[in-house]
Amino acid sequence: MSSSLAASKGWELHQLDINNAFLHGNLIEEVYMQVPEGIPNPNGLVRKLKKSLYGLKQASRQWYARLNFELLSLGFTQSLNDYSLFLKKSDSHIIIVAVYVDDIILTGNDTAGILDLKAHLHQVFSIKDLGKLNFFLGIEVCHISQGIILTQRKFTKELLQECDFDVSKTAKTPLPASVKLFADYGDFFPDLVQYRCLVGKLNFLTHTRPDISYAVQTLSQFLQQPRMPHLHALQHVMRYIAGTIGQGILLLANEQLKLQAYSDSDWAACPNSRRSVIGYIMLLGNSPISWKSKKQGTTSKSSSEAEYRAMEAASSEICWLVRLLQELGGLNLLHVELNCDNQAAIHIAKNPVFHGRTKHIEIDCHFTREKVLAGMIQLSHVPSHEQLADLFTKILPIQQHAELCSKLGLIDSQSPTSLKGGITDI
């Protein structure tokens, strides 16, 4: 989120690493340890620790408490919507600190304040200033004139080397058009560890590859007992990834920030449980910032109910994003446009007197209606062929898959043509 905002505002992203972070934590509980081998201890005494050490269960928590104390003492406030974010606002200036254990990203429009913060953290903790953000938690950050590209090329190449599959013949879509995966059909695949490991790594890859989200959630349903058809589908995903190694997300530099959302469902899509698959995508400007593909927890009695539940999931995400974005930049994000291709679901959300169609739906699903009445969300109908969330609910033909990937801001960082052409306007 902070990267998307920084890209749109043209702010620089800085990366820091704390040296020996866990050693800076102060212990609250009484913790004793035996004297390490090689150190004289004639009386056989144990030692009481005053500060944390690597390997202690309390180490990460106490380090975070220490960093939290230092940032709050400098005038930062902790985000109420994401506890890993710290903000400092003054007049027209803002500094944003994103923390992941001992890795820290700094951004904002207060250059002098960022330099002062670096100096203070170095004095207190001893930091390694890694300069401009280029690589963070396996995600590569490429700065171009249009904005920022997030990819996982290095991780993808390592994944393809480890999978031991023949990926010389690449695929155009994540899954074959006619595939149907059943839980009880086909011979068992004996190597459970390999299947689970590869699907787990693919799940990590979805952080910058929304185009494989539907395929990954489909394969994840068979982790307990995979069969050979599931393995063949996994191999097909790997062949698709092999042909799109450099694909990532383009976060556009654009001052006109508008939050819009698309939600969709595929009714009774799961052949095993007859439950529906829902999906949504959130765009800030034309840049994707949040997405999900998920099988519903209950069975929907109609396609309208399935779409209504998909809208509820998207509405919850919208509310969180609005609060977070208002914290980060004070943006006015009311009347967020939520696009759906089902007219009946839109009518249910807008019209509270549809009793006959809605009395079997749990009350929590009417969350969308509450936000529509409050003016936070504005529902819009979008034709099915323009529904961006289709990518998260079903297998698409090659041409439609490629078109939606382009509209979502997915771009091949290894292709000069794609970098020059940018993305398709929505």
Image: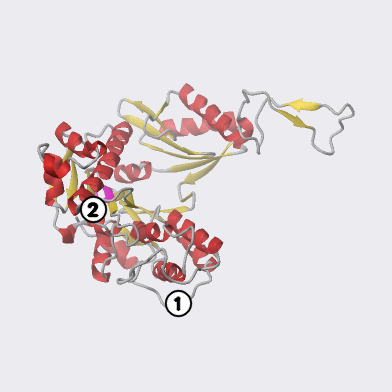
Residue 21 in the figure: left or right of residue 369: right
Q: Is residue 284 magenta?
A: yes
Q: Which amino acid does label 1 sit on?
A: Ser
Name the residue beneath numbered marker 1: 168
- Mark 2 or 1, nearer chain start: 1
The residue segment tinted magenta is 280-287
- Image point (66%, 38%), residue name: 55
Give residue 80's position: percent from left, percent from top.
Answer: 37, 29
Residue drawn 51% across and 24% down?
69
Q: Disc 2 marks which amino acid?
A: Asp
Q: Residue beneath label 2, please?
A: 264
Task: Please state which of the two labelled residues, at mark 2 or mark 1, is closer to the viewer.
Answer: 2
Locate residue 84, reporting x and y percent.
44, 35
Q: Quadrant of the N terminus?
A: top left
Q: Which secondary structure lies at badge 1?
A: loop
Mark 2, Cα crowd under 10 Å, few <14 / some 14-19 / many 20+, is many
Residue 248 in view:
no
Q: Is the magenta stretch mostly helix, strand or loop?
A: strand
Name the image quarter holding residue 193.
bottom right
Q: Position of residue 24 (x, y in %)?
A: 61, 30
> Which residue lies most toward the right here?
42
Residue 318, relative to residue 173: is it above or below? above
Number of numbered discs on residues: 2
Residue count near mark 1 (Cα–Cα under 10 Å), binned few <14, some 14–19, many ≥20 = few
Quarter placement of the C terminus: bottom left
Could you say which quadrant of the image residue 125 lies in? top right
Q: Nearer the viewer, residue 385 or 91?
A: 385
Q: Residue at x 61, y 33 (%)?
A: 59
